[in-house]
Amino acid sequence: MPLKLLVIAAVCLLTACQPQPWRTTDVSGRLPDLDFTLVDTRGHVRRGADFRGKVTLLFTGFTHCPALCPATLARLATVLESLEADPKAVQVLFVSLDPERDTPEVLAAYVRRFGPWFVGLTGDRDQLDALTKRYFLGYRKEREGRDYDVIHSDIILIFDRQGRARLLARSKTPLEDLQADLERLLAE
């Protein structure tokens, strides 16, 4: 075989062996592992370690959110429904930053609308502050009488089966990018 063909073949093999870049933002080694102590909609204490063994998506918000939360959760449900891999290997954690209004019953009814992959969690202010600081997810409560809003991040954090932070997506991340990266994580 001529030398030119050997060089082309070697280049093709080397580039094919290189890991392809993620379509969402790779945060491997830059964010801490999945770790928290919160309460689920049944009143059970849940910790990050409880979700090991599944690819876990973490999104913060509140049930009275007018647009961002329901749209993001609906988009995540669409992606999970279209996965080629087993969607039971994925868990979406929706953490309410509004425990005053998001009672266990309200939160349970809310997440149930999006599918079986969704778990609603919340906690007291200290627990929520610890979680949002740990993952740099800002939020603030804006009061106007009895009606108020919670301004929050649109970040979706994605953890691998070992609970390591691997990817960061946003509420508007293209569905095909999110699906491709989830399929890849599930195949690991």
Image (cartoon, grey):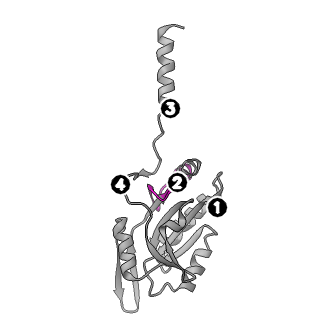
Residue that carries the numbered disc 1 in the rendered image: 88
Identity of the amino acid at label 2?
Leu
One can see residue 53 in this view = yes
One can see residue 167 in this view = no
Asked if 132 appears above or below 125 in the picture, the reply is above
Question: Which numbered marker is on residue 17?
Answer: 3
Q: Residue at x 37, y 82 (%)?
A: 125
Question: Which numbered marker is on residue 10?
Answer: none
Q: Residue at x 48, y 56 (%)?
A: 173
CA–CA distance between discs 1 and 4? 27 Å
CA–CA distance between discs 1 and 2? 17 Å
Q: Earlier in the sequence, mark 4 or mark 3?
A: 3
CA–CA distance between discs 2 and 4? 20 Å
Residue that carries the numbered disc 2 in the rendered image: 178
Q: Secondary structure at mark 1?
A: helix
Residue that carries the numbered disc 4 in the rendered image: 30
Q: Secondary structure at mark 2?
A: helix
Q: Earlier in the sequence, mark 1 or mark 4?
A: 4
Question: Where is residue 18 drawn, in percent x and y?
Answer: 47, 34
Does the segment drawn in magenta span residue 129? no
Asked if 99 appears above or below 84 in the picture, the reply is below
